[in-house]
Image: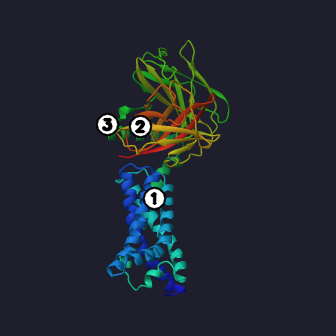
Amino acid sequence: MPTEGGALTGVAISATLHCLTGCAIGEVLGVAIGTALGFSNGATIALAIALAFLFGYGLTSLPLLRAGLALGAVIPIAFASDTLSIGTMELVDNAIILAVPGAMEAGLDTLLFWGSLAFALVIAGVIAVPVNRYLIARGKGHAVVHETGIHGGPPVRVVGIVAAVAFVFGTAVLIGEAIGGDSMHMEDEGAMAQEGHGEMATDQAEHGSAADAVRGLASSDSGMSLQLDQAAMAAGRPAELSFTIAGDDGHPVTDFEVEHERRMHLIVVRRDLTGFQHLHPEMAADGTWTAPMKIDEPGSYRVFADFVRDGTPETLASDLFVDGPADYRSLPGASDVAAAGDGFRVKLEGGRATAGVESELAFTVTRNGKPVEVEPYLGAGGHLVALREGDLAFLHVHPVSEEAPAAGKPIEFETEFPSAGAYRLFLQFKHAGEVRTAAFTQTVAR
């Protein structure tokens, strides 16, 4: 075996491609099975790692067994040859998949899923080459197999071509996702508002009756209109937002019903789904609602008036502009854990959400690793707002119980995601008299 120079590098590349074959088979099967069955991220990765080692060891062991070597002799050879190489690949490729926003939650029928997986495997193989080169130069790793004089597996040239194609495919998919995901953040406030209305029309055309499951797409509906008394405000300054809900006759509506302990819930969020506020305005005798508020960051905001009238839940929305240069952010990647400050952490339980299917959302609250018993808030264990990325459609979410759960038990909700895509979930819960908010990105599969 060579111990230096280009010859050593060539052997290391060949050994890595051989190892990458088994690793890729196991990884693809594991992630595909875990995704298809709705496993958690942790369970999916564990299955992928186990199958990667199984197939990696298997591709090395099979030629040795066929040549007549005893199983007791083959096992230590396979372990010595592949363990560090496969371990390096698994560490790298799973880290990349977890880092790509939405990759673990994307369905098997999406380019994002396969593109992320292809890219991650090739990069993992590249990083494993110097590891294998180091081992071979010292007579370890794949040098142990070479000492037997028995080789097998697919042709290295074919594997190299497949890896090159996979890299190009994966890179193209991730670049496409990055450009598509960031495009709305490159527009100014007016263009973003126009984009939201355009996506609203597209979603309604594509999903038909599914649009009925969402609200907040317009300022007027059901014979009522949300009328903000101001269309803009200054950043960082306390102000008072005032508005009315006008009927068809132009007069303010005043006959609202109590829902979640309030007659009006006012939700304010920037169009990149940051800056979330949940306010409870007060209504004057003339039907004018007012709420003190302060918005720190400039940008285009969406104001949602959420209420019940004549037994029907309604949500009307309008735009509010906060003066100044806006620094719009990309939507955070999907995660099942979110921080809520002061050591509070919230975990989102449950499997992968699918469009058009009733989904259960359960949230468990801990503080410094210990279960927390939340207090009743707005007539339930917590309050949840779900908004769709792009048009900021407002989903109707139902609490499963009107009682706060015991410590360690989840706060449960039910909703139906009307379309595939990314949604932002804002969970609010109460502890020691203080309301806290935890935000999650939920990727919904077709």
**Quadrant in the picture for residue 281:** top right
Question: Which residue is under mark 3?
Answer: 208
The amino acid pointed to by label 2 is Glu
The residue at 44%/64% (across/down) is 119
Question: Which residue is under mark 2?
Answer: 360
The residue at 54%/83% (across/down) is 137
Of residues 274 and 22, the one nearer the viewer is 22
> Can you tell which of label 3 and label 2 is closer to the viewer?
2
The amino acid pointed to by label 3 is Gly
The amino acid pointed to by label 1 is Leu
The residue at 35%/54% (across/down) is 108
Question: Which residue is under mark 1?
Answer: 174
Of residues 123 and 93, the one nearer the viewer is 93
Q: CA distance from mark 2 to mark 1?
A: 30 Å
Q: Look at the image and tell me whether residue 301 can be seen.
A: no
Find residue 430 and report its horizontal and vertical position in percent.
58, 30
Q: Look at the image and tell me whether residue 167 can be seen.
A: yes
N-terminal-most mark, 3 or 2: 3
Instruction: Give residue 7's mark.
Output: none
Q: CA distance from mark 3 to mark 1?
A: 30 Å
Q: CA distance from mark 3 to mark 2?
A: 23 Å
